Amino acid sequence: MDFKTIRFLTAAAVGLVLLVQPAFSQTYPSKPIHILVPYAPGGIADIASRIVGAKLTEAWGQQVVVENKPGGNAFIGMTAGAKAPADGYTLTMATVGDVAINPALFKDIPYKWDDYAPISTISDAPMVWAANAATPYRSIADVLAAAKAQPGRLSVGTPGNGSINQVVMEWMALNTGIQFQHIPYKGGAPAAAALAGGDIPFGVLASSSAAPQVKAGRLRVLAVTGAQPSKFNPEWPTLQSQGVKDVDASNWTLLLAPKGTPKEIVDKLQAEVAKILAMPDVKERFAGGGVETIPSTGAELDAKVKKTAQQLSVIVEKAKIKAD
Amino acid sequence: METLGNLAFGLGVALSWQNIVYCFIGCFLGTLVGVLPGIGPVATVAMLLPFTFGLGPAPALIMLAGIYYGAQYGGSTTAILVNIPGESSSVVTTLDGHQMARKGRAGPALGIAAIGSFIAGCIATLVVAFFAPPLADLALRFGPAEYFSLMVFGLIAAVVLARGSLLKAIAMVCFGILLGLVGTDVNSGTIRFAFNQPELTDGIGFVALAMAFFGITDVVSNLEHKDKTDVYDERIGSVLPSLQDMRMSFWAIMRGTALGSILGILPGGGALLASFAAYMLEKKVAKPPRNFGEGDIRGVAAPESANNAGAQTSFIPMLTLGIPSNPTMALMIGALMIQGIAPGPQVMTERPELFWGLVASMWVGNLMLLVLNLPLIGVWVKLLAVPYRLLFPAIFVFCCIGVFTVDNKIFDIYVLAGLSAVAYVLFKLDCEPAPLILGFILGPMMEEQMRRAMMINFGDVTIFLTRPISAAFLIAAAGMVMLIALPSLRAKREVALQE
């Protein structure tokens, strides 16, 4: 082989690569897409993936497989998502805690925000500060007064150590200078049951687990934890409107691709997901669980995660929340 | 009377063509995954969840429910014929069911399992229909103190359950508790015994543990004896139990159903705990002659009734409170939410067709299962009647698939392999696995509930005795200790007298 032939072949190869690159994203998706969920089936990240996945299948004619990889504080699923080939065929549905609390909570966390290419925020589930209906507490002011009278003697249930619910509780405690007795449960359902049964006076719960109990007269919602009232229950006042400054948190999910995924593919996914999240039947499905759809651009998601992580890490540190 | 009207309305829903078809699909799939060792309803329901998108809420729920209680039927078949629990809740069925099969009574064992499950299923359906709201309130009244005392009772009963050496049973319970403690402590968030493996931070999977102790170990021990295979390869013969079998089993079925119905509504245990508890109760209260562990038909009838009753009543907290009592129920809640229905107390009033349709479909489903499991038992047996040299690799494969599908983790298969080695050594040392399994389930729950009770009450220990339900369990537990102690005291006295 003489030099010319080699040069020709090299040029041809380079040309081929250049040709293939855009063609690759034009033909995307040409095989099934996997959405990794770092949680067991049944949770909000799982439900969100299944709803969005089914619509992606409809739109693109490619099977979207939801793969649950629960465990290890979401480390297993998140790490698998970060290490997957950056070709758009393996995506990850994370929750706010995975990207904004875990980094502050764990010293040796095996993934970081920079490992991902953000696609879009997906769903937003309001959280509430709820009291058992048999207790005398009717507003956040009542809670604060009682907490001041007997510091550290008010028990608050949450779905677990290091959950966003616990962070909200500590945030409120820090901003009002009071202390609560934290009672962690193994997930939202047992926490809701304990609160409904009167084992504990207070809980920070997803509005979807609180709402039916409120209707049944077992719980009373004292506040929503976001800055804005929930669209589905506008009658619940916010924490901020009751004098708890700055506290603004909800449990949202986000869709990620591994870092290095071609921009065309990320954009294509973002555009399709935005379309899906605007569909009335999709909105209705999410609304069934009291959840709103929140489409965004990748840049908006990136900014949101960075801002939230910054806010929450301060609280994790100040409140000395520990989980390992 | 209103309930009867509602049930009739529910039957109308359940008997529509579409719902009958989905009920059948659910029951059929349930029986299939029940028969196959390792593969359970949780993985099956999770895989089918996307397919329920297009269905209405009623057929979706009816089908998924069918998978769950159908698996309770199917699990007993494998337990009796192959001595491997097809389903984790049929672990205890292996104890007497397989012994019956060995003695040539596989037919009646399979028959009583199906009949017991059917009777329990019918009664549990009525329990759900008539008592769902008050029973849900009972479940809510169980606070951490009550759970702790219930677990104490359960653990002590676990020792009673064991055959042979009491010392070994206690050691196995303790070993089970230690295995159960692997993972993240709920109360403090501390990770224990995980050796920096993220896969271990959620603890050892129950399916892996059950398959290691009741699946793989059994296969390996069978392979030791070339001449003897544990598969029942003769003709099953009549599956109809004799009149005497029926008479013997009747109260066992009733007691199993009652216990299963109650334990089913409590979070955490469901069908699994119910079957263990029913077996232990039967061992203590059944009329002599008692041959438990050697093929007593009541040792099949009671747990099989209990696990089916428990599977059905575990729908009560889900349907009336929106609170799942086990992972399968959590998936049902997911299925409802995907349909745009917020699970909770209002489902019963706002979507009566859903609630009553589901309840009535349990009747229809139980009838289908009786048909699937009795006259068609031969089909399921054929699945298991292939030569052992072909069957045992298949069992290994299914165990691995089953363990993998729980969390989609290869790591769990290594856990299965490691535990199998441990289980085999313990088997060789004549240590019963049943107390270990109970220690594994109950120990960590007991710790979690005790510490939570203490936290909520700011360190006040008297809480366990001042709450009536809790005190009752503790007293019962003390009574059990006496039960264990007394016969041995008596035995000692007899020995002394003989000398």
Image (cartoon, coloured by chain):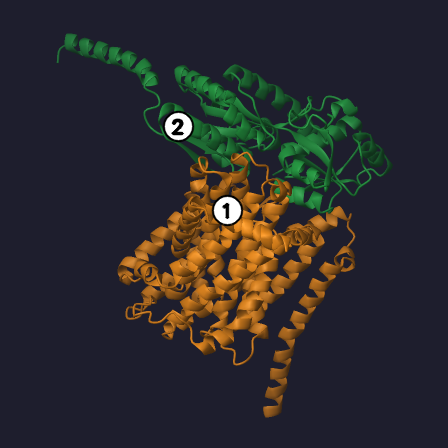
| Residue in the picture at 60% in, 42% down | B347
Which residue is more in the foreground, B140 or B411?
A: B140
Q: Residues within 10 Å of mark 1 (few under 14, many from 20)?
A: many
**Residue B221: x %, y % from top left:** 37, 65
- Label 2 chain ID: A
Q: Confirm whether circles 1 and 2 share one chain.
A: no
The chain painted green is A
Q: Can you tell which quarter of the image residue A81 is in?
A: top left
Kind of residue indicated by mark 1: Val
**Residue A180: x %, y % from top left:** 76, 37
Query: Can you identify the residue that label 1 sits on?
Result: B13
Distance from Cα at disc 1 to Cα at disc 2? 32 Å
- Is B425 situated left or right of B358 in this image? left
As drawn, the label of residue A57 is 2
**Residue A315: x %, y % from top left:** 69, 27
- Label 1 chain ID: B
The chain painted orange is B
Kind of residue indicated by mark 2: Thr
